[in-house]
Amino acid sequence: MGRLISDIAVTDRITEDKSITKHIPVDEKTGKTKKLYIESYGCQMNFSDSEIVTSILKREGFDTTSDINNADVIFINTCSIREKAEQTVRRRLQQFNVIKAKKPDLTVGVLGCMAERLKTKLLEEEKIVDIVAGPDSYRDLPNLLNQADEGLKGVNTFLSREETYADISPVRLNSNGVTAFISIMRGCDNMCSFCVVPFTRGRERSRDPDSIINEAKQIFDQGYREVTLLGQNVDSYNWNAQINFALLLEMVARINPELRVRFSTSHPKDITDDVLFTMNKYENICTYIHLPVQSGSSRILGLMNRTYDREWYLNKVDRIREILGNDCGISSDMIAGFCSETDEEHKETLTLMDYVKYDFSYMFIYSERPGTPAAKNFTDDIREQVKKKRLQEIIDKQQTLSLERNKREVNKVHRVLIEGHSKRSNDYLQGRNSANKVIVFPRKNLRKGKYVNVLVESCTAATLIGNTIT
């Protein structure tokens, strides 16, 4: 079992801390005179946004660099979903301060959700910050950089009801050349009481489907073989009341049968039978759904304003299994120690996990976020020690379930898209099957970007291990 790190245990894929995951750019040498270093934290939407920012600045004469000491501009794309994420960013800004002391002309900017939440406070609290830009103001970055060059501080945290960056072709950062993200919508209309996203990313708005399809076609033509359609709540996608998410999913799937299609994230109240039937219809739509439950207690779900109860959620899981079969991968988010949660209600989360049998989960202790309905209306009254104990019990349960689910795959053949070398050895390759399970196998003469059939011979709770077959 992984050791406890603050409020989350990191145990390979079973529980990844989405709020402190970090991406940095690769080196580009296209002859441009200025260097951009952009560091991204948080969810997949943030990484996708960093690709948009990079595209905008390439037009302004920037190449990316992976060496922070070579940068003319440092951007840190932030997450506000938990206090730990913001603390991580603040520590990183202190490290940037050391670099800026030696390089006074360096421009430092804070982007994303933390920028949107704190706005001008960041300029006051972090003296080295020159630019603060929210998720909807990235087109204004060239102007903000010009202001910084003139010695002025630049702030733009305007939340838009229209901005989707549909016309901007993202620069693929940290790309393996095989998988890519496509943002299909922005913002969130769900007012979950614990969540800052509606306040930091604004209201829901969907992107023009033609621009999505064109981007997916371009990606495929460039050699990518998998796309993940992104949104805070993809199932709410709706273009002019004519194209819903099920139709969009079908349109992307029909581009080419060799293009795998994934999506994230689904809100349980919005994923429809039409989406499930579309997944079942097209073999290249992966049979994996991230379906965050947050709690197994109906009372706690009510306090969280999740708009469903325990029974409704379990019925939705039953429907997924009925249409897509028991091999469909299902993952979740779980919060331990929400306001007023009792021991019995915590046990309800554990019994719900037993029923669903999640393949893996993202698990956290409750972290009160300023300005949210929960912070305004409820008392964060569960002791930290109790939160950590409950979290550990959830993690232990998920470890058991992940191993149980993975054991079902032993002695079965899986179609795998090769994504690159294994993290632990260049003698092995890795990829994922349709249910989003990582499979590791000997390299032989195989190349990334190709589909192979792998006979799974053994497993851990996080990984399937096998050998390719012809």
Image: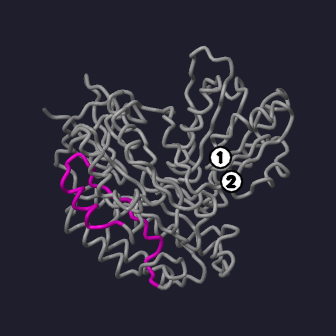
- In which image quadrant can residue 308 be found? bottom left
Q: Nearer the viewer, residue 403 or 433?
A: 433
Identify the disc placed on residue 137: 1
Q: Is residue 389 left or right of residue 469?
A: right
Q: Is residue 297 magenta?
A: yes
Q: Which amino acid is tagged 2?
A: Phe
Between 419 and 277, the one nearer to me in the picture:
277
Labels 1 and 2 touching (C-beta < 8 A): yes
Residues shaded magenta = 271-298
Residue 393 % position (x, y): 47, 70
Disc 1 residue type (three-letter): Ser
Badge 2 is on which residue?
Answer: 158
Q: Is residue 316 left or right of residue 375?
A: left
At x 64%, y 49%, the residue is 112
Residue 410's place in the image compared with 151, above or below, is: below
Q: Secondary structure at mark 2?
A: loop
Distance from Cα at disc 1 to Cα at disc 2: 7 Å
Specify whether residue 104 is painted magenta: no
Give me the residue at 40% from left, 56% from top. 239
SS state under label 1: loop
Q: Position of residue 236 (x, y in %)?
A: 41, 62
Sequence-first disc among 1 and 2: 1
| 114 up-or-down from 39: above or below | below
